[in-house]
Image (cartoon, grey):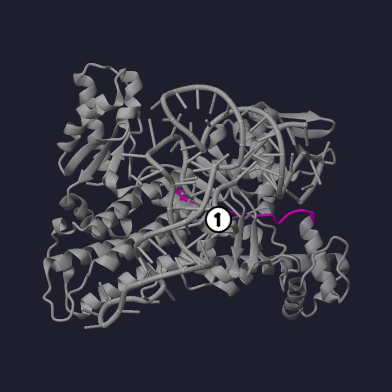
Amino acid sequence: MNPEGLAASVRAVVESWVAEAGLGIEIPAELKLERPKSRDHGDYATNIALMLAKPARLAPVVIAASLAPKIAQIPGVGAAEIAGPGFINIRLDSATLGQTAQNIVEAGSAFGTGSALAGRRINVEFISANPTGPLHLGHTRWAAVGDAIARVLAAAGAQVSTEFYINDRGVQMDKFGASVMAAAHGEKTPEDGYQGSYIHDLAAAILIARPRIKELPIPEQFTAFREAAYALQLKQQQQVLEQFRTNFDYWASERALHESNGVEHALEHLREKGHVYELDGAIWLRTTDFGDDKDRVLVKADGEYTYFASDTAYYVNKRERDFDLCIYLLGADHHGYVNRLRAVAACNGDELDQVEVLIGQLVKITRGGEEVKLSKRAGNIVTLDELVDEVGVDAARYSLIRYPVDSPLTLDLEIITLRTNDNPVFYVQYAHARIASVLRNAKDLGIDWRNLGFDAALLSHARENELLGALAEFPRVVAGAAELREPHRVARYLEELAAVYHRFYDSCRVLPRGDEDLAPEHVARLWLCAATRQTIFNGLQLLGVSAPDRM
RNA sequence: GCCCUCGUAGCUCAGUCGGAUCGAGCGACCGCCUCCUAAGCGGUAGGCCAUGGGUUCAAUUCCCGUCGAGGGCACCA
């Protein structure tokens, strides 16, 4: 009996009661069955009686009194009690709850996955930086969170593509090329050029690879520097992201979009939809038809495409590749883009909500309370690879994911590398390692728990009950994280689960002591440990964080 | 001026698609290892959930105002 199954059974009880009483009222689509904060309130609680009070024109307690006995009859339910203003607190019998442990072990890595988003094709675009320098803190949050969102959506059954849109066209690229060329010649960085030692590193690398590049005539030489630097810098970004365990399914090049006439094609397409017009020599998209504050220029009076035109074309391209939902992760400094991106969808004949924009607040780094601003390589910004070098991938990813993205974040480098309770990554990983150790010890003792039978009813200790209940929540947590695009929920859940496990471990001996004989209770607890290990493992997997067997 | 996000314990933050006493870690204080990882566990102290209204049986959660913090409002990229 899992929470979903129980919810369905409760719903059936409510439906039959409504029918019998001839009330003819609506039952809320989402019948709430939650884990009460207090253990005294049972394993699950429902507020259905409170919800129905008004439409049924009956006191909540009266409704609860008719429903509770019927709920108590549901197989697997031990008791159903009325409490407070009309809550029904449900207690499962221990065999039913205990069975969860075996179910989880048997489901293995599939435990937690679902089908809520089955059949949906979702495009998740994030980072999308200029290839003109190392990825910095502003990109780092999205590298971790975007990847985790994609994993969580996939776990909910969606078909997901993660995409990085390379802004490899426009004046920034030229400034970048000019900066690298100047460095190669030992000249000063041009006005508005790129600073930082990485520019000199790029120049040096190019000079080694192409010793005669400086002999080229200036226009060709400039192009050669720009292109060589672009290739190297993009590769560097890709390597850093790979090391960060953020893998993109698709690297979209803005330049390639133009070269394949994707922009003209999109413009033509939108013109047919009737939201394109000309004014003052420029070509506009009438985004104000769909909630934007002002119309946006696609082609400037001088004939140049705007950046917005590329964005629009890229959206059309995504739709032509058959994605029915496009999620964009942007920094808070881009929130002005939300309405126009949604309007682009609408101009394309889609629903506004086929575009979803998640806005992330900025990240600050401190070290022992002092803000860290300087980067050795990139001048005045801290880069992703520097962060990883200092704290490691697991700590960096986890720390970035465990907070909702709409709150500003300050990471203290000293704290996220601590190996204590202060640092949630280690707390969760430690729980995993601790369980792995118990399972190893069981093996060393020759206990083949998988083949010794499992008596679910033996898991009746309060701490076992608490742990089983927490484990059973995992699929709902994953589903919720996917629905709300909030992977931090998974992290928070894991912290809670780890705490519950540690409490269980503290009061329930798993392996036989000394010369004690192996009892069925030990076997049942090993199943419970294995289920917990699997759940923590699956959860960390969703965050892209490793689950070590030893620490 | 208009728009977005935020305001919860001394600190860093959860919780908020309305529900029963708002939680965790740190910091302070007191306890728990002769056998499975003490990187752990238990307990005490600490809150008019920024503020004033409204909706509701029920508001930290939803709506409006105020105050405070951060960020936006290009024929830039």
- Amino acid type at circle 1 is Tyr
Counting from the top left corner in percent of width and height, residue A167 is at 69, 54
Question: At x 70% / y 57%, what residue is drawn?
Answer: A168
Residue A100 relative to residue A259: left or right: left
**Within the magenta stretch, is there residue A208?**
no
Nearer the observer, A227 or A153: A153
User: What residue appears at the point 86 percent right and 75 percent down from the top-left corner?
Assistant: A185
Q: Relative to A274, is A180 above or below? A: below
Residue at 42% x, 62% y is A540
Q: In terms of depth relative to the viewer, which is nearer, A190 or A333?
A: A333
Q: Is residue A527 visible?
A: yes
Element assignment for label 1: strand
x, y percent for residue A27: 32, 26
Residue at the image point whose x is 56% and y is 72% from the top: A391
Q: Magenta stretch: residue A166 in it? A: yes
Left-right relation of A52 to B14: left
| Residue A547 in sight from this viewpoint | no
Where residue A415 sits, quadrant-wise, is bottom right
Q: Please, which chain is the residue tagged with disc 1 on?
A: A
Please identify the quarter of the rendering in which residue B12 is found.
Answer: bottom right
Quadrant position of the C terminus of chain A in the picture: bottom left
Q: Residues within 10 Å of mark 1 (few under 14, many from 20)?
A: few
Query: What secondary structure characterizes most of the magenta part?
Result: strand
* Residue marked by disc 1: A250
Residue A490 position in % (x across, y down): 43, 54
> Which of the pair A173/A61 is nearer the observer?
A61
So how many labels did they put on this image? 1
Question: Relative to residue A514, is residue A425 depicted above or below?
Answer: above
In which quadrant of the rendered view does residue A467 lie? bottom left
- Looking at the rendering, the stretch of residues picked out in magenta corresponds to A159-171
